[in-house]
Image: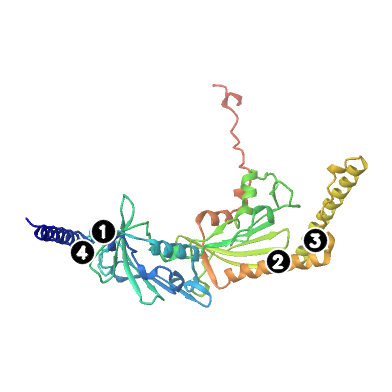
Amino acid sequence: MNQKTLIGLVIAALLAIVAAIALNHSSRPRSDTVEASGWLVPTLRDHVNDVNRVVVTGAEGKVLATLERGANGWTLAQKGGYPVDTGKLRAFLLKLADARRLEQKTSNKDKYAVLGVEDVAAKDAKGVEVQLDGLAQPLKLVIGNTDPRGGTYARISGQPESWLASGTLTVDKGAADWLQKDLADLAATRIASVAITHADGSRVMVTKNARGDANYVLADVPKGRESGGEFAVNGLASTLAGLRFDDVLPTKDAVPGDALLKARYATFDGLVVDVTAWEKDGKDYAQFVASLDAAQADKGIAADQAKAKADYDAAIAADEAAKKDGKADAAVAPAKPASVEDPAKDREMRLAALNKEVADLNARFSGWTFVLPAYKYANMNKSMSDLLKPLEDKKPAADAAKPLKKKA
């Protein structure tokens, strides 16, 4: 065999190997190709901030939630335009943008239901369709079941291929689940008094004389009765601490029940929150109004400034005493607080902060009626008997103590 023939055979063998590799590669399932390891929704990458509308649609094509970005930020159409929890929404969009195609699944529409990626027009569709507007091209995808081993099944609407995507792409189906539910957060230590008035005119009131008091005092305890345990009485002041609602509707759409409950929460620094609440159809509704008691605000600021000055004077005296005793190293001259440096300016700033707090609360409260968690409503709906020690049962005297009747 001459050299030219040998070279020809080698070249032919190499070409055959290359052809075999190409054929093998082309016959592999698409899940083994580069496409399978790409982004689930590449058009969302680096364009999360462009999204201006999100529509979540469930079974039978029912729109479950419409989130829209406008002049007032993100709001929810199904709840009268109430603000959306933007942190939750952004977390979902970022997770979706980061999702990768791990494995191609069925392209047979008859098998979509197993993965929960069937068309949501179906009556018993398990997944949800998410539509994202604001991108270069509108995007719709069906998000289905999660895989026990990790990942979520998904399918771009209109495309036959379904995918196992990375991450848990859970989509809330309840409109209220997308709301910003933080309503108020007034620590119990800040509350000076709570007054509750029931529909029948009966009233309950607890008060503290000073911030430092450990417990509240129940007012107008009936003669012959005693105030109940500290836990029950003190608990009335905790209603507005970490208060979140379950649902919301525009006040114009809320029809109050017949038995209205009124509650007033007054703080030591002058902030006042009035609540009107009622029960209806198994739900607990409430409306809120914030205001500022100017006289109490002045009193609170004066008390805070007096305490700050007393603390400062005490620190100065301690510093001077340390120097006098030759303990210069231990002496630390305290910084003069703003309330001592310029009491008038400090008072102005404190009042401005209080007025801003009132405005911020009313911006959240005004025009809305909130559905409260049952335990928060129950904490307002307290009667005097709920806060008193129970009466002791008086047992009749033992029969042995009774005089015996003589037999005839």
Q: Which structural element holds mark 4?
A: loop
- Contact, mark 3 vs mark 2 (Cβ under 8 Å): no
Mark 1 packing: few (<14 Cα in 10 Å), some, or many (20+)?
Answer: many
Q: Mark 1 vs mark 4: which is more N-terminal?
A: 4
Residue of label 4: 107
Residue of label 1: 115
Mark number displayed over residue 353: 2
Residue sitting farthest toward the left? 1
Mark 3 packing: few (<14 Cα in 10 Å), some, or many (20+)?
Answer: some
Residue of label 3: 338
Mark 4 or 3, which is nearer the eye?
A: 4
Marks 4/3: CA–CA distance: 70 Å
Q: Amino acid at mark 2?
A: Ala
Q: Amino acid at mark 4?
A: Ser
Where, by quadrant of the figure, is residue 324 drawn?
Answer: top right
Residue 85 visible: no
Marks 1/4: CA–CA distance: 11 Å
Residue at 20% in and 64% down: 107
Q: Which structural element holds mark 1?
A: helix
- Contact, mark 1 vs mark 4 (Cβ under 8 Å): no
